[in-house]
Amino acid sequence: IVLSTDGNPLVTDYASGTLVRLNRNDKQQQEIIAADLAGPVGLTWANADQDVVYVAEANTGRITRITINLQQAPTPIISGLAQPEGITLMNDGRIAVVEVGRQRLLAVDPANGTVEVLATGLPVGHAAANAPGPVHLPSGVAQGAVFHDHVIAYDAVIFCAQAFNRAARLDIHVVGSEFDGDALKRLKRMAQQ
């Protein structure tokens, strides 16, 4: 889900393979922006103008560029990923991607498709309890400053995975950040509360 400046959300619908614009004032109003997506999970704005988004298609391993207000076909940025899920636009213009199938966090350059591995061995791809298979808990990623009483990180990529043994737990891994180990310990303690 992403929010536009007018407060209306865009959401991916995994089951129907669509990108949908909702209206916050009229819950019945839904506009399909793109269809025929293969398991859309992650979603992020591609620019400050909010006229383009990137979508992670988990079933085909693609990151796709979609122009919101034009009748253009979605454009694949990269393919061959193993179940991409959470995505976010980084300050340098690359897309941070949680690649669940390989338990990695990647940085993908949308201009040329080059990939940099930022982290490996991430605890992702957990099966949902009491659900018919294959149902997994989605993994996400966010980018920006981290706040708790004061700023503790600038331009950090924060990886968030949900895993559970009866109770949800949020694991936070910070990549490319500039803060001391005590700040990371405080952040992890917050996640466990």
Image (cartoon, grey):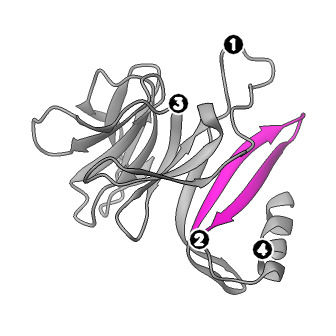
Q: For mark 3, what is the residue? A: 82
Residue 138 horizontal/vertical position (percent): 62, 36
Q: For mark 4, what is the residue? A: 184
Q: How much space separates mark 4 and mark 2, taking CA atoms?
A: 12 Å
Residue 114 horizontal/vertical position (percent): 36, 50
143 vs 74, left or right, is right
Q: For mark 2, what is the residue? A: 176
Q: For mark 1, what is the residue? A: 133
Q: Give above or below for 18 relative to 193.
A: above
Circle 1: element type? loop
Residue type of the residue flagged with mark 4: Leu
The residue sitting at 86% across, 67% down in the picture is 189
Q: Nearer the viewer, mark 4 or mark 1?
A: 4
Circle 2: element type? loop
| Residue 170 lies in the magenta-colored region | yes
Count neighbours of disc 2 (C-alpha within 10 A) and say few if under 14, some if 14 to 19, many if 20 or more.
Answer: few
- Between discs 4 and 2, the one toward the N terminus: 2
Q: Name the image quarter holding the C terminus.
A: bottom right
- Between discs 1 and 3, the one toward the N terminus: 3
Residue 83 horizontal/vertical position (percent): 53, 30
41 vs 17, left or right, is right
Residue type of the residue flagged with mark 2: Gly
Q: Nearer the viewer, mark 3 or mark 4?
A: 3
The residue sitting at 80% across, 79% down in the picture is 181
- Between discs 4 and 1, the one toward the N terminus: 1
Q: Which residues are magenta?
A: 157-175
